[in-house]
Amino acid sequence: MSITTKSILALATALAGTAAMAQAAAPAPESTVSFNVGVVTDYRFRSVAQTSFKPALQAGVDYSHTSGFYLGAWASNVNWIKDYVGASEGSMEIDLYGGYKGEIAAGLTYDIGVITYQYPGNTADSVLVNANTTEVYGALTFGIVTAKYSQSTGNFIANPNSSGSSYLELAANIDLGNGFTLTPHVGRQTIPNQNGNGDYTDFSLTLGKDFGGGLTGSVAAYTTDAKDAFYKVAGYDNLGKNGVSVGLKYSF
């Protein structure tokens, strides 16, 4: 082998090594944007049906920064404003949220933020009050367990004089292996000035499966002690009745 050939090979090897080192040392992006789209057979919010036990098509977008700051938007079709409130308009829910996540100590993290549930064009105020709702929230996670508290800053989902409505919840995320997770959950919803009829406790159990490639599935069972006097109207069942929902979501 000639000296010239050896020199060329050595130079190529050096350049390849330098490129590999540069690639390995490339910093992680400071922010990321992700999207998701999915479908569920029964859209439940705090175990209460939002689509009158019918399917829902849902989609969202999330932005996150390495500082812990995040923003997001999520949308779904809904039925309760027309079916249960009796309003003429209100078939869409759009959630806008933002907050901060961080670590307090090893294994202990926090999440604080604000979320607004918007129902564009809803006419619930012609019957009760506008359905649009804003909440502030705070959560602590230790290991697999998360405790979260949410409180409305004004009226809560079309209930008059319901400012300060709150939801306290406790959940665990149990890794079963092979892409399966099990999430038991318990929550307590309180709505002021409704003679206690709007208050309820709910339980759910969700089995999730990560199929890879951004595709996940879920099967969830729900039960509540929601009162017929508040969550049932003529021609429709109690929104908090026992039920099972199957979902499929693709994230990219």
Image: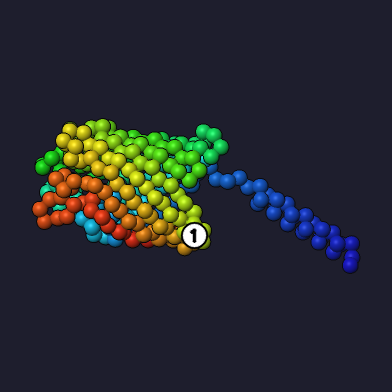
For the point 33% across and 38% down, the residue is 168
For the point 10% across and 53% down, the residue is 234
Eyeballing the image, is 236 above or below 196? below
**In this picture, residue 137 sits left or right of residue 210:** left
| Residue 131, image x, y percentages | 20, 42
Which of the two residues, 162 or 77, is positioned nearer the viewer here? 162
| Residue 172, image x, y percentages | 43, 47
| Residue at the extreme front of the image, as rendered | 225
Determine the secondary structure under disc 1. Answer: loop
Which of the two residues, 60 or 223, is positioned nearer the viewer here? 223
Which of the two residues, 105 or 60, is positioned nearer the viewer here? 105
| Residue 4, image x, y percentages | 86, 62
For the point 24% across and 47% down, the residue is 225
Which class describes the residues within 10 Å of circle 1: few (<14), some (14-19), or many (20+)? few
Count all numbered tags in the image, as a single digit: 1
**In this picture, residue 82 sits left or right of residue 153:** left
**In this picture, residue 101 sits left or right of residue 53:** right
Q: Which residue is mark 1?
A: 179
For the point 74% across and 54% down, the residue is 17
Q: Quadrant of residue 230?
A: top left
Q: Is residue 136 visible?
A: yes
**In this picture, residue 83 sits left or right of residue 75:** left
| Residue at the extreme bottom of the image, as rendered | 1
| Residue 41, image x, y percentages | 29, 61
Q: Quadrant of the C terminus?
A: bottom left
Eyeballing the image, is 36 above or below 108? below
Q: Quadrant of the N terminus?
A: bottom right
Colouring scheme, one of rainbow, by chain, secondary structure, one colour: rainbow
Q: At label 1, which amino acid type do we have? A: Gly
Q: Is residue 98 visible?
A: no
